[in-house]
Image (tube, coloured by chain):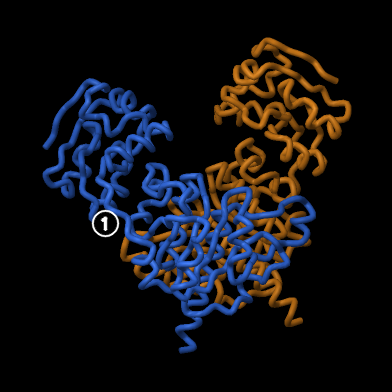
Chain colours: A blue, B orange
Amino acid sequence: MLEHLTDAADPRLADYTRLRDVELRKSLEAERGLFVAEGEKVIRRAIAAGYPVRSVLTTRRWVASLADVLGPATVYVVSDETMEGVAGFQVHRGALASMERLPLPSTETVLDPAARVVVLEDIVDHANVGAIFRCAAALGVDGVILSPRCADPLYRRAVKVSMGAVFSIPYARMDNWYTGLDELRGAGFQTLALTPDQSATALDQVKMGDRVALLLGAEGDGLSSRWLHEADEPVCIPMSPSAMANGVDSLNVVAAAAIACHGLMRSADLSHQES
Amino acid sequence: MLEHLTDAADPRLADYTRLRDVELRKSLEAERGLFVAEGEKVIRRAIAAGYPVRSVLTTRRWVASLADVLGPATVYVVSDETMEGVAGFQVHRGALASMERLPLPSTETVLDPAARVVVLEDIVDHANVGAIFRCAAALGVDGVILSPRCADPLYRRAVKVSMGAVFSIPYARMDNWYTGLDELRGAGFQTLALTPDQSATALDQVKMGDRVALLLGAEGDGLSSRWLHEADEPVCIPMSPSAMANGVDSLNVVAAAAIACHGLMRSADLSHQES
């Protein structure tokens, strides 16, 4: 159903208010139980993953692009100026959808069928969370577990950077950081703590078992000392000695995650070949 | 030498004009032969790498942080408001330096001592170029070759995202895209074209020789068909089949570069162990 609106302050557009105001969006999205998907491709993936559409906000030029998947959802059609007035920036991809959040599964539900998981400790940048989900999904990781303070994977920018991978990989948020690794160990996961410390075992040299959880720490500070010490083994990605001498002393968390997820997938393939 | 300035339009601050205006900056930096380094750490790395300082722009609060490395350079001290007025945004890291560019080496000079190089074809996003340099430097790649249309590694954002790695790894720009791979082959480099095409050889399965050039294509489109076909071998990073079924069909170029550079480093280590 199309509704043409002209007033950026129309209460029917409130789901889309000031999309770059992180603090506002956190409270607004929690209260209303929604998230925002941006761009045709990502909206299609959210719908395909089973998230109900609350409404769509688009401009006349883009209105036809999603017609086949929206069903009975209300589509608000506005001018470019009104769109910018509501969202607070120029929306290049021409379509936004407000989607209902679904209840997150428990960590147990995510861990139960999984052989390879990634555990994110306090990664607070939405783009990094999205990029890590994209890597994890593309490289066959079975699930993602978030520490309590990790950024929200359904925040608009995380969704966008992930290209919708946040919809295709199961994830859960642990209740308690302090005891967070207990459940992983209880479920039989070998816990590997990724660290830039070059005295740790190189990732490629680790003998990986059937169930492996890779722990990734925050931008800048890396893993907490608690998790680093509680993990079964610290592991590193070997760096070039000359780069370290030049002060290039680490990879960013997304590059490290990409290499580590690739290592997890290799190890899973190898263990299949052996068995 | 400290000079306290109050006028954002002061001609002495012209090197720092509108840092987010990409088109303006391209012409201004080319005409003046300068680039801008942002933040204490990156400025220190640029100086350590031998780039001459034209001037520094900072605020009173940050003025002491670089005193030990600036030598006779002129330091313009301004208020936060003037800084924002010149640069066009709020500079969080408190210090900008205008640095002299140095002549780029020839591709031959970069290739001559190298065993592992990365070749970037038309990567136009400065953040991606910076992130790839950071990965390449950390993972021991010996040099980077840029296609003629690749984004400038010394553009402020590329420098910043690279954390200064653009200063620590030699790079050159090829004159001619069309014949660009001839020189690599002439120098005895095995050319590997990274592609998302899963029918290509998996990167880990490639037998790598003493000299390897990894070709990385543009965001979105990947490598040109010319380079893909001219390369010795197309190679891929294996993806999860279920992810591909869910539409998560590729890694972003930085994640792919990270995994590929790690693969290059492993192969170099292995060939050293064997010999």
Residue plotted at (69% across, 32% down): B36
The answer to which of B10 and B61 lies nearer the viewer is: B61
Q: Which quadrant of the figure contains the N terminus of chain A? A: top left
* Residue A14 placement, left or right of B258: left
Residue plotted at (54% across, 54% down): A254
Give how far across and how far down residue A272 sits, in percent. Answer: 45, 83
Q: Residues within 10 Å of mark 1 (few under 14, many from 20)?
A: some
* Residue A88 placement, left or right of A101: right
* Residue B217 placement, left or right of A1: right
Visible in this render: residue B135?
A: yes
Residue located beneath label 1 in the image? A49
Q: Is residue B216 above or below residue B89?
A: below
Give how far across and how far down residue A125 sits, in percent. Answer: 50, 44
The answer to which of B241 and A196 lies nearer the viewer is: A196
* Residue B13 placement, left or right of B238: right
Label 1 sits on a secondary structure element that is loop
Q: As drawn, which residue projects farthest toward the bottom?
A: A275
Residue plotted at (61% across, 23% down): B87
Give how far across and how far down residue B33 sits, in percent. Answer: 72, 31
Toward which corner of the image does residue B138 lie, by quadrant?
Answer: bottom right
Residue plotted at (56% across, 29% down): B20
Visible in this render: residue B149?
A: no
Q: Which chain carries label 1?
A: A
The answer to which of B230 and A201 lies nearer the viewer is: A201
At label 1, the amino acid type is Ala
Toward which corner of the image does residue A62 lie, by quadrant?
Answer: top left
Give how far across and how far down residue A206 sits, in percent. Answer: 61, 76
Q: How many labels does the image show?
A: 1
